[in-house]
Amino acid sequence: MKMIVLKYRKRKTSSSLGYFLRMFGFLVDSVSENMLLFNYFDKWKGFGAVSCDAEHVYVDLTEHDEVPFHVIEDIIERQDMAFSEEDVNVIKEMWEQFYCGEMTEWMYTISELYINRKMRYPNVRLLEKAIYGLDDAAGRLEANKKWIKNMCGKLAYCYLACQVNDALEKMEEWPWYDALRLAGICDAVLAVQHGFWGLYLLKADILRNRRGMQEKVMDSYCFLRDIRLTENVRIGDDVRKYALLELGERYQTAAEKERKLLYPKAVEYYLQFEAIDPNNIRVLFKIAMQMERRAQRQMGRIEEAVWRYERLCALVERIGFANVNNVEFEYYYKAKFRLGVIARMEKDIPKAIAQFSDASVCWDKLKTNEYLEDIYGEQGRMEVIRFLQGKYKKRDCVISQQLAELYENSGREEEAREYYIKANMIAHRFGQG
């Protein structure tokens, strides 16, 4: 199975197609034209609408505001998987029902806005809307006898149900769909389609939130991490990246449940991921955070953390705030904060002020991001920004307080007063909790 790489100019076009393809177990990655400088530059063959090599299918979306279905047909034809004419027809019928519309909003809300579990914030309207929307879509799919009997229909049903369960987990609610039943559907397809690597990831995601299934979840990820040859088909590094990231996050979560701040097993997988792709913003932050904690315990050098934090920030700034997703933007914000903390500890006051100042204006940069308005509309975009500001209110207060103290200690009373007032305004607007 080949990784699908979407080259785009308009992010919503790329996101809508990416979410739609993931419904059927496809492995999808997206790169803006700017990001080609860092990833896929040597591999990109996008001289036409769709092209491929041994491990990738490249899809050039830069001329598309809406994706015509023949692009999806081209993608399917270039996969080294067996899709029947009926499979393609079912995908087309579902494309007419689910492509674009509110589906992108629902998927984005669950996968990128409410990225962390146990996020019972007072305002969960967006998350609840996504849950009920995807549940309704799964119900319509299951009710269509033609779709639910088909391999592609079954996978789409499992994917949508998994997204609903994932969102419910984030609200600390019980799942609505039985995970073992969904995993069994995936196993039935895998019995016929042995090289459908995306289904191992889907199955692991389905079982991830079910108690007692940790071993089976690890088995699925480890399979993709370790495999070299299966029926003479080699798994490429881009597929292994999926497994390495998930393995790292599973061990990280397990360590955090035991209230551990250092998790060597997770970092081991993150470093393997970094060796394949040194430009992944999420992984750069996770490794940097661990290197910083090791340095605090005199187990390593702080420079290893600083280098990754700075590289992360440089990547985001070069790619452009309009082209990074919400998760990447939040890691940029947190990296700036950590760089400010480290600089203050090292008594580099000008650098601390510069880093904290960059972090303090992050939400203003997010307000200019047209991508959120493309997904949610103007009113929804502001609601998302208010949600994120509320989510990080404590850190924003700390940033303003740090800047106030740094300016005060530097004799710059006017700037200090400005940030003391800002800290009080944040605390008043979002509450003290």
Image (tube, rainbow, N blue to C red):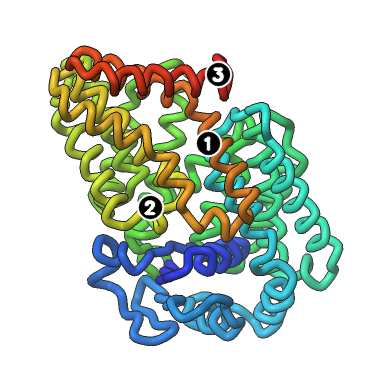
Residue at the disc numbered 1: 388
Classify residue 69 as left or right of residue 407. Answer: right
Closer-to-camera residue (283/276): 283
Residue at disc 2, secondary structure: loop
Estimate how packed mark 1 is, as few (under 14), some (14 to 19) or many (20 or more) residues with alpha carbons within 10 Å. Answer: some
Residue at the disc numbered 2: 321
The Cα–Cα distance between marks 2 and 1, rounded to whole angstroms, is 16 Å
Viewer-nearest of discs 1 and 3: 3
Classify residue 353 as left or right of residue 431. Answer: left
Estimate how packed mark 3 is, as few (under 14), some (14 to 19) or many (20 or more) residues with alpha carbons within 10 Å. Answer: few
Asked if one can make out residue 5 in the rendered structure from this viewpoint, the answer is yes
Identify the amino acid type marked 3.
His
Seen at 25% across and 27% down, the residue is 340
Seen at 38% across and 52% down, the residue is 321
Residue at the disc numbered 3: 428
Q: Is residue 366 above or below residue 255?
A: below
Percent position (x, y) of residue 41? 25, 69
Viewer-nearest of discs 2 and 3: 3
Percent position (x, y) of residue 274? 26, 47
Identify the amino acid type marked 1.
Leu
Seen at 20% across and 12% down, the residue is 409
Residue at disc 3, secondary structure: helix
Percent position (x, y) of residue 14? 50, 67
Closer-to-camera residue (298/389): 389
The Cα–Cα distance between marks 2 and 3, rounded to whole angstroms, is 28 Å
Quadrant in the rendering for residue 136: bottom right
Identify the amino acid type marked 2.
Phe
Asked if one can make out residue 247 in the rendered structure from this viewpoint, the answer is no
